[in-house]
Amino acid sequence: MLPLRHLHRGYSRLYQGLTGPSSSGNIIMRGLSSASTSTFGTNTNNSVGVYLGEVPLYADFKMIDIDQLEVLQGPQGTLYGLGTLAGAVRYMPHRPDLNKWSADMTSKVFGESHSDSPGGEVTGTFNIPIIKDHVAFRTVLGYYNDPGFMDYNYTLKTPGVSSPQAGTGTFGTSGQQAENYNRRRDLNYDHTFTTRNQLLVQVNPNIKAYLTYMHQETKTGGRQANGAGVMGTSEYESPWRYAEPSDRTTDLFSGEFFFNLFHFAQLVNTTAYTHQTVDYTEDNTDLLIDLDYGYQEYPKFSSYAKNHYKYTQFNEELRLVSTHKGPVN
């Protein structure tokens, strides 16, 4: 069972040029990114294609019950389209079993460097044959508690009253900090619930379809970034004056249809619809002050923005591939 973030921690060692940080789902291949940044987790404009079977993914879905992992480096536009300039990563899931009941549960507890809290994961996989040799259902569920390690030590106690910069270009003395700021630890935590549900309908070995519904909800308390030492902040310390929570909800509906044509070719049709909603808060106090618009002349100035985004992707692919070994294919 391989969550997407574990690609970076474990399997990325096996593939030269493949890397990325934990928790955000940001895959970097050959120096190019899948475009998912910090904790906001959308892959809407990507250079690395991420697939589950034949279905493209536009969000950081946790990968449970995976049979095989494929990493295709270099441009893959011929088979996978424009969004694979750096390459493609394909997760091949275990498919529903038409003849065997099964259930599998796993759980673990772990520690995170520079975090005060333990983390944990609970996952379950259930396979249910419905009509022998013809219909089966497989569902996976998971809950992930990834502890944070970035501290927001300078969130304002009372916006508009507390000073966002107690000293000139600094956060002031320890006494001034105690007067103006709250210290909030480990805010870049990641709490995720995910589920994938797949129905296999097989007319016969040459005609079958996989119908899939995936749903995921992720809540984070802050960004996985440290502000590059703004006003003397440390490596695991964020300088922002407001907490920056994020809520992401993603739903994916897909159908994969396979037709074997007289032992000379296979016709594959893939249809997928993805809908994402992202709500997050973003501190822009330092940005507006640094732009020198005069904001810094106002006493106790601070600022944040609440953002709401919706993303929708629709994919349709029809592919005919020869399977025979004749002179023409």
Image: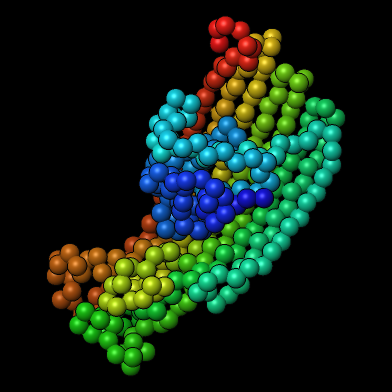
- Identify whether 99 is placed above or below 1: above
Instruction: Please tell me whether residue 19 is drawn above or below residue 152 in the rendered image.
Output: above
- Residue 325's place in the image compared with 238, above or below, is above
Q: Is residue 35 visible?
A: yes
List x then y, in percent, for residue 17.
44, 46
Q: Nearer the viewer, residue 203 or 224?
A: 224
Residue 265 falls in image quadrant:
top right
Instruction: Name the residue: 33% across, 91% down.
Output: 174
Is residue 317 rendered to the left or right of residue 122? left
Q: Quadrant of residue 91?
A: top right
Specify whether residue 34 is in view: no
Q: Answer above or below: position of 247 versus 30.
A: below
Q: Determine whether, in the image, residue 204 is placed left or right of residue 122.
A: right
- Residue at 76% x, 21% y: name it: 205
Residue sitting at the far top: 327
Left or right position of 67 against 28: right
Percent across and percent down for residue 187 are 47, 70
Identified at 33% across, 93% down, the residue is 175
Q: Is residue 136 left or right of residue 297?
A: right
Rendered image quadrant of residue 5? bottom right
Q: Return the residue found at the far bottom.
A: 175
Figure disc tally: 0
Residue 37 image offset from top left, x and y in percent: 41, 54
